[in-house]
């Protein structure tokens, strides 16, 4: 599942990154995501969505919060963490 599909407050682990599917998409996008911490094995949490349309998506990795556009978040594949409530 992609980061863009997670609900608000959900925690997940980054499993892999994939190139955007859009023609003419910035080829350096994956490199930028890696440089700011979106690497396989890293834990993240969705903290907020913009209005309207859930764009951008605010994501916390470690102690840093990033705002990703929806198409950027679709490049980050994640495995949701199971809640032990």
Image (cartoon, rainbow, N blue to C red):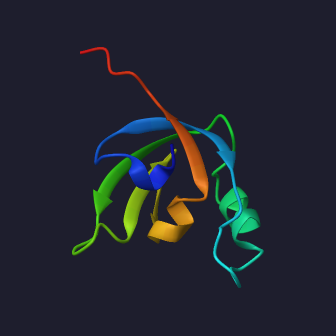
Give the quadrant of residue 22. bottom right
Could you tell whether 31 is left or right of 70 in the image? right
Q: Position of residue 12 (x, y in %)?
A: 47, 36
In the rendered view, would you say 8 is above or below 74? above
In the rendered view, would you say 28 is above or below 80? below
Could you tell whether 81 is left or right of 52 in the image? right
Q: Position of residue 48 (x, y in %)?
A: 29, 58
**Tally of marks:** 0
At 38% from the left and 63% from the top, the residue drawn is 57
At 44% from the left and 56% from the top, the residue drawn is 4
Q: Quadrant of the C terminus?
A: top left
Q: Position of residue 20 (x, y in %)?
A: 65, 67
The residue most toward the top is: 84
């Amino acid at each position: 599942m992609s980061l863009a599909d997670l609900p608000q407050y959900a925690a997940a682990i980054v499993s892999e990154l994939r190139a955007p599917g859009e023609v003419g998409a910035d080829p350096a996008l994956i490199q930028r995501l890696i440089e700011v911490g979106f690497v396989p094995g890293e834990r993240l949490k969705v903290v907020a969505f913009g209005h309207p349309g859930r764009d951008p998506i605010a994501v916390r990795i470690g102690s840093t919060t990033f705002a990703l556009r929806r198409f950027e978040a679709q490049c980050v594949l994640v495995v949701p963490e199971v809640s032990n409530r």
